[in-house]
Amino acid sequence: MNIELQKCLEILKNGGIILYPTDTVWGIGCDASNSHAIQKIFKLKNRSESKSMICLVNNRNMLNKYVQNLPKEVNDIIDNETKPTTIIYTHPKGLSPKLIAKDKTVAIRIVNDKFCNELIRKFNKPIVSTSANLSNFETPKSFKEIHEDILKGVDYVVNLPNEKKLANPSQIVKLKKDGTVVVIRA
């Protein structure tokens, strides 16, 4: 795993994009503060820039660095969810404008995966996570289902032995101003 982490870190630090397993599905990722790298992902996926992408952090301390005025309800959501949950936050900071939606929000998940957690910890910045599929194609459930164009279009493909079958994409929720939780994707 250490060799894979080092290779990913080198790519991320140099503005490249990686294909990696997350706590949910195979993802395409890059430095969440690098607009040029994020643009590469939009181009690779043939995805409209109006469609936002998820950002991964490794813990609550990192989350606090990238969201102004973290709502207190967030702790309840994080502590009580039994499946990976991405939360849409208002007033992000320190991230590329290309990650921020028109309504000034960003989707962030605290990752619960050993490899991702260690990668983000060593990188010391959030990374983008978007499913490893071309726009309008199904999200791959395993590495074997990833389209050839994606495999050829990234700068590095993580190679971890004993690939696990990954789960479904994360649940996505949004907190309204009154503290009400709205489920965007279950």
Image: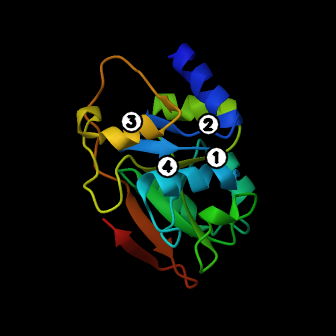
Q: Secondary structure at mark 3?
A: helix
Residue named by callout 4: 129
Could you tell me how far apart the alpha carbons at marks 2 and 1 are, in whole angstroms? Answer: 6 Å
Label 4 packing within 10 angstroms: few (<14), some (14-19), many (20+): many
Amino acid type at mark 1:
Pro
C-alpha distance separating marks 1 and 3: 22 Å
Q: Residue at x 44, y 68 (%)?
A: 173
Label 1: element kind: loop
Residue 120 is tagged as: 2
Is 116 situated above or below 29? above
Q: Earlier in the sequence, mark 1 or mark 3?
A: 1
Amino acid on which the number 2 mark rests in the picture: Ile
Circle 4/circle 3 CB separation < 8 Å? no
- The residue drawn where x is 61% and y is 36% is 120
Residue 28 at x, y percent in the picture: 47, 44
The residue type indicated by label 4 comes to Ser
Which mark's residue is nearer the viewer, 1 or 3? 3
Front residue of 125 and 181: 125
Kindly report which numbered mark, 2 or 4, lies closer to the viewer in this rendering.
4
Q: How is the image coloured?
A: rainbow
Q: Are marks 2 and 1 in contact (CB under 8 Å)?
A: yes
Q: Is residue 176 above or below residue 96?
A: below
Label 3, on which residue?
A: 151
Q: Which mark is residue 155?
A: none
Q: Which residue is mark 1?
A: 126
Quadrant (top left, top right, bottom left, bottom right) of the C terminus: bottom left
- Alpha carbon of mark 1 to alpha carbon of mark 4: how far? 9 Å
Disc 4 from disc 3: Cα separation = 15 Å
